[in-house]
Image (cartoon, rainbow, N blue to C red):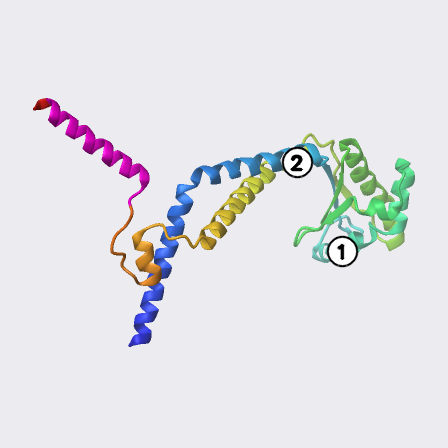
Amino acid sequence: MNQENMQENMNEEMEIDLLDLAYMLLDHWHYILLCLLAGALLLNAYAFFGIEPTYQSTSKLYVVSASDDSVVNLSDLNLGTSLTADYEELMLSYPVLNRVIEKLDLDMDYNQLKQLYTLNNPTDTRVLQITATTTDPQLSMDLAETMAVEAVSYLPDTMSTKAPNIAQHAKLPEYKAAPSYMKYTLMGGLLGMILCCGVLIVRYLMDDTIHTADDMEKYFGLVPLTTIPDSDRVEDMEEAYYGSSKKRRKKK
């Protein structure tokens, strides 16, 4: 029975503490709002001035091996699915990347070039997407287009298959792919708000000052016999008292 009462008292105290904590955060809403705006502004400025924008361009290959009668059947589609995986693996090999470097006269090795490419094969398709990402929109387009052209001209002989079709040529990107200013702004605002709330909560938890008579009873189980009023309230009471006394004297 005593344990149940103690558990109820602990739960009640926890609920009261959480309620007090919520009121404390509401009382400091202006600080939280200020930190939110500051964090959003700082990360937005960092994204704008500190991160170089990148651009993406994509070309697409359609990998299918038609029969001799030029009619695509189910076996051709199944073979195209298998070939797509092979193309995806071989396109980032040294011979193909080296041909791209020579074609565009790039000042980089094949490992550096490899990092600029992303290959993607959507599920249940024979489409291979070639995406190049750089800080130069023209270079991104040239890389995506040249990779598609070199893959079509070089790999079929290596794999002893028919050449795939270029379903989409690379285009000059009109907009940057990254960074997203909206994303950084939201992240900055969220981080600023979390940091401010964290500091306020730590200060609240470390503050062991007794502010009211209710705090005395809550933490120590003691009921104070009397309380000393705030000095400002005493001055207000004195002014009200002496002011009313003077008025009564004047009436007499």
Figure check: 228 above or below 244: below
Spot the residue most to the left.
Answer: 252
| 7 drawn magenta | no
Q: Which residue position is annotated with label 2?
A: 46
Please tell me which residue is depicted at 32% across the width and 51% down the height of the picture.
Answer: 212
Quadrant of the image occupied by residue 3 = bottom left
Q: What residue span does the magenta drawing correspond to?
A: 229-250
Q: Which residue position is annotated with label 1?
A: 85
Measure the alpha-carbon separation of dots 2 and 1. 40 Å
In the picture, measured across the screen, residue 109 lies left or right of residue 188, that is right
Please tell me which residue is depicted at 62% across the width and 38% down the height of the picture.
Answer: 43
Residue 137 marker: none
- Which amino acid lies under the numbered mark 2 shown in the image of this protein? Tyr
Q: Quadrant of the N terminus?
A: bottom left
Quadrant of the image occupied by residue 108 = top right
In the picture, measured across the screen, residue 248 lies left or right of residue 153, that is left
Out of 191 and 102, give the one closest to the viewer. 191
- Which amino acid lies under the numbered mark 1 shown in the image of this protein? Ala
Figure check: 174 above or below 212: above
Label 2 CA crowd tier, 10 Å (few <14, some 14–19, many 20+)? some
Give coordinates of residue 48: x percent, y percent: 66, 32
Give coordinates of residue 134: x percent, y percent: 77, 38
Please tell me which residue is depicted at 83% across the width and 39% down the height of the picture.
Answer: 146
In the picture, measured across the screen, residue 45 lies left or right of residue 70, that is left
User: Which of labels 2 and 1 is toward the front?
Assistant: 2
